[in-house]
Image (cartoon, rainbow, N blue to C red):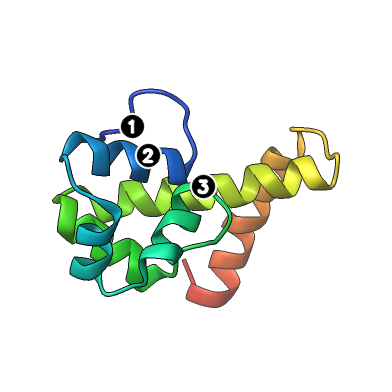
Amino acid sequence: MTLIKKTITFGEHLRSLREQSNSTLKAVSEQIGIDTSLLAKIERNERQPTKTIISSIANYFKVDEKDLQNNFLSDQIAYKIIDQEADLSILKVAEEKVKYLKTIHHGK
């Protein structure tokens, strides 16, 4: 079950999860093993979480790790498109390229 009800950034989603659980930044950061200031920066979309941090967040809040990872990666793609002032048609090209690269690297 996905917990993302509307289009929000990874950081906004993380803050929402934390607030819904009535947890403080300090409590969450201690449980997932990162500095409180880093967690605050991730919530403000000023820093990027690692795969390990995303996994720890998923475990802490008991949410689907793949959903969190998808939310994070979609942020990265969206920011890249905005930064490059690219047209959204690039997404179709990227989709085809992913299929192609998978066949080369994984034989699928």
- Quote the CA–CA distance across marks 3 and 1: 17 Å
107 or 31, nearer to the observer: 31
Pointers 3 and 2 in contact (C-beta within 8 Å) = no
Graded by Cα atoms within 10 Å as few (under 14), some (14 to 19) or many (20 or more), the crowding at tag 3 reads some
Picture quarter with the N terminus: top left
Q: Please name the amino acid that badge 2 sits on.
A: His
Residue beneath label 3, please?
Answer: 44
Residue situated furthest top in the rendering: 6
**Residue at 51% in and 52% down:** 73
**Residue at 39% in and 69% down:** 51
**Residue 78 numbered mark, or none:** none
Q: Please name the amino acid that badge 1 sits on.
A: Ile
Q: Which of the two labelled residues, at mark 3 and mark 1, occupies the earlier sequence position?
A: 1
What secondary structure is marked by label 1? loop
**Residue at 33% in and 32% down:** 4
Q: Going by the image, does 40 lie left or right of 32?
A: right
